[in-house]
Image (cartoon, rainbow, N blue to C red):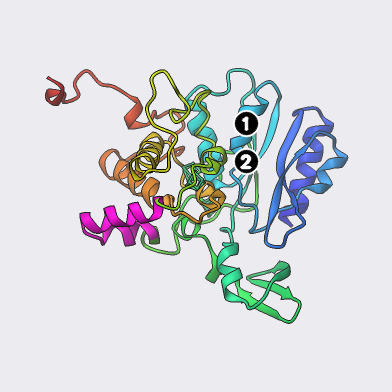
Amino acid sequence: MIQQKLREKAKELLAKKEVDLVIGFSDWTLPLRTTPVFIRTPEGAERLVWNSFCENNLAAYLHKFSRLKVGLVVKGCDARSVIALNLEKRFPNHPPLLIGVVCQRLVDRKKVKKAVKGEILHAVEQGDLLLVKGENFEVSLKRDDFLYSSCRSCIHRTPHQAHILIGDPVEEVSLVEAHPDVDEFERKSSEERWKFFEKETSRCLRCYACREACPMCYCGECFVDNSRPKWIEKSLSPSDLAFYHIVRAYHQTGRCSGCGACERACPMDIRLTYLTQKLNQEVKDLYGFETGIQPEAAPPLSTFDPEDHQEFIK
Ligand code: SF4
Ligand code: SF4
Ligand code: SF4
């Protein structure tokens, strides 16, 4: 069983002092959720869990533990984020040891909540089913009907880049032809796209939970906080919201692994991945580049070739 193997491997790494810390997932008090856990002793490894609710991209924590030898539990997308961070020279002291788990795709808890009447008090996975209980109901749901959009369109579930792989590699296929939200966005006219973008961003509180959840947002000072020069006001005006969301998406172009952690962190249920995944798709079509797949290849927007066309800046 994957969870047992994960615990054994973490225990061994900590006992042999190959790592100082293992970052993984643990059970939490709320159903359909797990929480990140930071384990420093071999005995602590018993707290690790693995299921379809392990939704954080734990690579986001690496910036806080740069002086330690970290063993990081990664899914396919998380491993790709680590490769992208490595290319950006984020691990000068100790590159993390990646404990890869073949991902079974994640369950979207909001979709599950919509499918039942009443508050969910308990939920467990049993094979392909989700057994969900509340005060007056008990239902069994087909797990694959409740997956995140980013997971339905994911093809890189096996963290091939990991130092240790738990689970058998799976075929590189998605459940759908295209990311459902990107597909919907692409079918709109330019005016409809802008309206959609404005409608989504109008709910934004600028709480920056999306930024905090993302491993690729690690600048010491984010452009939204910078006062010299001041790029953006602190307001919730449509232009400031548009500016934040457009710049954020462009900063992620060719760096985003499509993990969906930003969207899951948003308290306002604002759709974010249609934009980052649309830009990723453009980068793939134009340059054949995908984040974290080619370990040595720099993202196209981070490189410069003197032979590049540059008439437009003359
Ligand atoms: S994007 Fe892929 S690897 Fe990441 S959680 Fe979803 S299915 Fe798993
Ligand atoms: S998490 Fe949501 S509300 Fe907060 S800044 Fe990001 S998009 Fe806006
Ligand atoms: S922008 Fe969102 S989807 Fe992309 S790497 Fe960051 S958290 Fe993951």
The one of 73 and 279 positioned closer to us in this rendering: 279
Counting from the top left corner in percent of width and height, residue 306 is at 22, 18
Q: Is mark 1 within 8 Å of ligand 3?
A: no
Determine the image quadrant of residue 66.
top right
Quarter of the image for the C terminus: give it. top left
**Which label sits on residue 58?**
2
Determine the image quadrant of residue 279.
top left
Q: Answer with left or right where residue 87 lies relative to residue 310.
A: right
Which residue does the numbered mark 1 point to in the structure image?
62
Asked if the stretch drawn in magenta spans residue 118, the answer is no
Q: Secondary structure at mark 1?
A: helix
The count of marks equals 2
Q: Would you call the spot at circle 2 few (<14 residues within 10 Å), some (14-19), or many (20 or more)? A: many
Q: Secondary structure at mark 2?
A: helix
Q: Residue at x 61, y 53 (%)?
A: 168
Q: Answer with left or right where residue 122 lies relative to residue 163.
A: right
Is 152 located above or below residue 290 in the figure?
below
Magenta segment, which residues?
181-201
Q: Residue at x 80, y 45 (%)?
A: 8
